Amino acid sequence: MTTTSGTIFVLYHKGLRTGGPEALHQLVDMLRELGQDAYLVPHPHTAHNSRVEQYNVYNAPEAPEIVDSPENVVVFPETYIYEMPKVKLARRMCWWLSIDNSLTFMAERMWQRNTAGLVDKAKEGAVPFARMWKNRVNPGMLRKDRDVVHLVQSSYAWAFIATRLDVVPSLLSDYTPNAEFQGTPESPRNRQLVTYNPAKGGHLIDAVRAQCPPSIEWRPIAGMTRSEVVATLQGCGIYLDLGHHPGKDRMPREAALSGALTVVARRGSGAFYADVPVPWEHKVTPGRDEVPTAAAMLPRLIENFDAEVAKQDTYRSAILNERSRFKSEVEDVFVRGRLGKDAYDYL
């Protein structure tokens, strides 16, 4: 049984190099590997941009526009969910690559602030998003539109979408290209070095730094070239992420593949073992004790570094198996028509 007899169109932001657009390239590439007629379609506002050169490794050609016919499928990333009503005949799928940063739930928060009278001049930028939520992309309208197939990148998103939209979504993750992170590092590993992304809970990490011993070194991963990111992850002891984990984030996985110890907060996907399968003692519980807990944890992990890294062997094995599992997920959704699976169906 096949679910798609026509063409699969995947809407994307052309020219943007982040985890979301790369996942969309991976989807088209995998669909074509499975014999499906699939294409990326640039959003009209980005069609003039140049394609990301690094994504040339994927077999993901572009089509100039979506063909709205009953035999076709259109995949919308959650960033373009407001475009779904324009498609009347083709089967529509929404791929929730992120939850916290998705337009739907971000706009919902903005609308609630607006109706509560909390929007002042400093928050005027929220009003257009709030209006969009009211008119086109709010959860109530999505619950009513039962013809949309919801795909989710993480178990966190699976639980969230199932609860908020009263649907049974289907897992469609992504995979981490691993060759560059498994290469031989140019210099020895500095176990005392903690790296982090300032955009992921940076204010909390600043507070942790203030409580840590001076023997621990810190290096933010910001303003670096790709090769510098790889070298930093291969040379550090710990990668610390106290952010919100709106989806299955890429850098914690890249750090683990590089041989570093990945430590995350139990927020978003970080709270789900299926998304970030590291031991309990490598996760920090949010709350009033989060900063002192993290500050006390780091010296212990550094002192027993080799043993602690070995505890993440399961995590690294799962990351190395991501492409194989992604192929099964894509095949289930688009070829076999087996919808509704979550991470535990692929263990």
Image (spheres, rainbow, N blue to C red):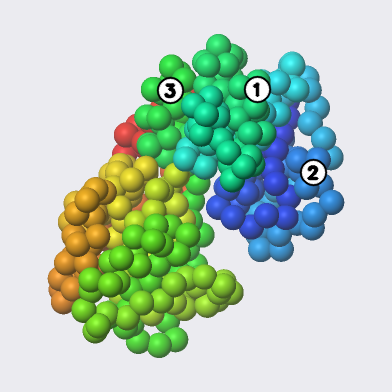
| In contact (CB < 8 Å): disc 1 and disc 3 | no
Which residue is disc 3 drawn over? 164
Q: Can you say which quadrant of the picture contains the C terminus?
A: top left
Question: Which is closer to the viewer, label 1 or label 3?
Answer: 1
Instruction: Tell me if 263 is positioned left or right of 55 in this view.
Output: left
* Amino acid at dot 3: Arg
What is the crowding at mark 2: few (fewer than 14 residues within 10 Å), some, or many (at least 20)?
Answer: few
Q: Which mark is residue 332?
A: none
| Label 1, label 3: how far apart the Cα atoms are | 16 Å
Mark 1 or 3, nearer chain start: 1
Neighbour class for label 3 at 10 Å: few (<14), some, many (≥20)?
Answer: few
Q: Residue at x 62, y 42 (%)?
A: 121
Q: What amino acid is found at the position of numbered circle 1 in the picture?
A: Arg
- The residue sitting at 23% across, 55% down in the picture is 290
Q: Secondary structure at mark 2?
A: helix
* Residue 46, percent from left and from top: 78, 47
The answer for how far apart the CA atoms under marks 2 and 1 are is 19 Å
Q: Quadrant of residue 138?
A: top right
Residue 206 place in picture, x, y as percent: 35, 67
**Is 71 placed left or right of 230 in the picture?**
right
For residue 326, side relative to residue 310 (left or right)? right
